[in-house]
Image (cartoon, rainbow, N blue to C red):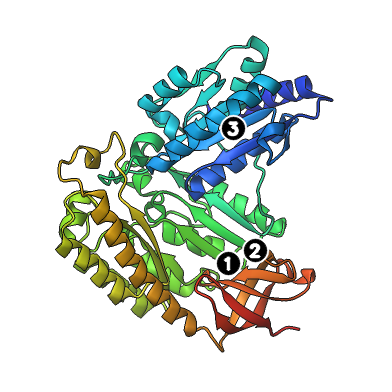
């Protein structure tokens, strides 16, 4: 079915549910697990739910509808899901709460089998490719009083025009593509989100223009591999309509940089093997693109990278970093690193530490390797003992934090442009915002500054945040 027609059908179901709920003052709650793509999906689910007459609550005991948006990247996400499902049983028995579970984890058969066997009181199971049909599934659950399972294994489509309820009125995430073709041996994402498929340039640009008109200042472009945007379409000769000259990730960056009202552009996550020269030049030339780039490493060992199927070597990664630093003034980098991948030797781990020392990251997101059923990594025999994983993790953590402390000190005395996000969560007498390099800054100021880009002088560093003084006062 045509995607536009499918969206219209779902809007009809939204209206049907809204009429059923009229005058009932029903509430919903969403528990989002995982990455920023999941958070963006949850905003779309929220948009659909609120069109159906529900209002949001953060108290599960008040929820008439409880939705899980799951992640399957790490094992603790499963533990969190099953623990929360156990808590909801009594709430459902008392309030009749409808329980819906969606997201990446629902694409794993062993998980859905466990839910159906151990948590039979759940009402709706939906996958990553059927999220748009949530209104229809909710309507039929209400009307028919039957459980619904709507999960497909084939690659999904891109659905435009669904409502969205954003959590923030200053910063917005915009998905530019879905799925992944890389098949890293530790990662389940290609199996649960499908192959790469890009949104059309016009839809993306129109969405960002609309956000700018609403007062949004910062845009985060999302995708499993953003710098391969439109690559599959070009390679397979799939026709797509260029809009404002956009036919690649680099040209998309130029187009968004021109949109009036948007002051900052970020993106996540690129893949080092696809970080082409034209993208590097776009980052250097576009004044709104933050010069803080997330460049996942995963391991500093060429051998481990080969087994991970990352398709670059330690030397190629370091050469890319040098090229980027030479082309982009004041470049800062963050990264992801997996500790304890199967077969990782002490020498391999030392290679990782060597890359961290040489690159001098602004932030390192560290993860202990977690086996995921259905991935090649899970079947590898040379798994690393947990004790060794944790010891290596602590060594990496110590190195990364020592670098962060040194890097933070370089900010002291400098004037930084800070986008003011709101009141500090720990001190409502202080405001908080972020630098272009994504450093959290707290400072004294009145609420009229929220949403503005202002000059702040950094006066002290405190590892995970900087303290500053407002230069506009």
Q: Residues within 10 Å of mark 3 (few under 14, many from 20)?
A: many
- Residue located beneath label 2 in the image: 217
> Which of marks 2 and 1 precedes in the sequence?
2
Which residue is at 28% across, 60% downward? Answer: 391
Q: What numbered label is drawn on residue 417? A: none
Q: What numbered label is drawn on residue 264? A: 1
Spatial CA distance of label 1 from label 2 is 6 Å
Q: Is residue 156 above or below residue 437?
A: above
Asked if disc 1 and disc 2 are in contact, CB closer than 8 Å, the reply is yes
**Quadrant containing the C terminus in the rendered view:** bottom right
Quick one: 8 or 416, which is closer to the camera?
Answer: 416
**Image location (x, y in percent) of residue 268:** 45, 57
Q: Is residue 288 above or below residue 267?
A: below
Extreme-front residue of the structure: 387
**Image location (x, y in percent) of residue 227:** 39, 56
Spatial CA distance of label 3 from label 1 is 32 Å
Q: What numbered label is drawn on residue 67? A: 3
**Image location (x, y in percent) of residue 176:** 49, 49
SS at badge 2: loop
């Amino acid at each position: 079915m045509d995607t536009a027609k499918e969206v219209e059908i779902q809007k009809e179901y939204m209206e049907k549910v809204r009429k059923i709920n009229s005058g009932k003052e029903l509430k919903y709650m969403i528990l989002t697990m995982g990455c920023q793509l999941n958070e963006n999906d949850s905003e779309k689910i929220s948009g659909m739910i609120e069109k159906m007459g529900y209002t949001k609550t953060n108290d599960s005991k008040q929820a008439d509808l409880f939705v899980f948006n799951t992640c399957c990247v790490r094992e603790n996400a499963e533990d969190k899901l099953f623990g929360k499902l156990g808590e909801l049983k009594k709430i459902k028995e008392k309030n009749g709460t409808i329980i819906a579970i969606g997201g990446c984890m629902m694409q794993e058969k062993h998980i859905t089998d466990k839910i159906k066997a151990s948590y039979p009181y759940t009402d709706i199971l939906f996958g990553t490719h059927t999220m748009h049909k949530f209104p229809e599934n909710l309507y039929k659950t209400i009307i028919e009083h039957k459980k619904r399972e709507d999960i497909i294994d084939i690659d999904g489509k891109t659905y435009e025009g669904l409502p969205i309820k954003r959590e923030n009125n200053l910063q917005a995430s915009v998905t530019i593509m879905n799925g992944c073709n890389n098949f890293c041996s530790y990662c389940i994402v290609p199996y649960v989100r499908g192959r790469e498929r890009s949104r059309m340039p016009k839809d993306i640009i129109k969405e960002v223009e609309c956000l700018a008109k609403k007062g949004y200042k910062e845009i985060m472009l999302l995708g499993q591999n953003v710098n391969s945007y439109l690559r599959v379409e070009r390679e397979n000769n799939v026709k797509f309509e260029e809009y404002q000259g956009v036919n690649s990730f680099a040209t998309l960056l130029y187009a968004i940089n021109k949109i009036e009202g948007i002051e900052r552009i970020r993106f996540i996550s690129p893949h080092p093997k696809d970080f082409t020269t034209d993208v590097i030049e776009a980052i250097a030339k576009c004044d709104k693109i933050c010069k803080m780039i997330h460049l996942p490493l995963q391991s500093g060992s060429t051998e481990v990278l080969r087994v991970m199927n990352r398709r670059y070597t330690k030397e190629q990664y370091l050469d890319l970093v040098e090229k980027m630093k030479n082309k982009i003034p004041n470049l800062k980098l963050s990264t992801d690193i997996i500790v304890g991948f199967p077969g990782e030797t002490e020498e391999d781990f030392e290679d990782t530490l060597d890359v961290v020392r040489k690159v001098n990251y602004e932030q390192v997101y560290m993860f202990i390797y977690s086996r995921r059923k259905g991935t090649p990594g899970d079947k590898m025999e040379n798994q690393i003992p947990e004790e060794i994983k944790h010891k290596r993790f602590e060594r990496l953590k110590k190195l990364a934090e020592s670098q962060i402390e040194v890097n933070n000190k370089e900010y002291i005395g400098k004037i930084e442009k800070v986008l003011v996000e709101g009141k500090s969560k720990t001190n409502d007498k202080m405001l908080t915002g972020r630098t272009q390099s994504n450093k959290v800054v707290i400072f004294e100021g009145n609420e009229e500054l929220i949403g503005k880009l202002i000059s702040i002088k950094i006066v002290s560093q405190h590892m995970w945040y900087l303290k500053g003084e407002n230069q506009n006062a």
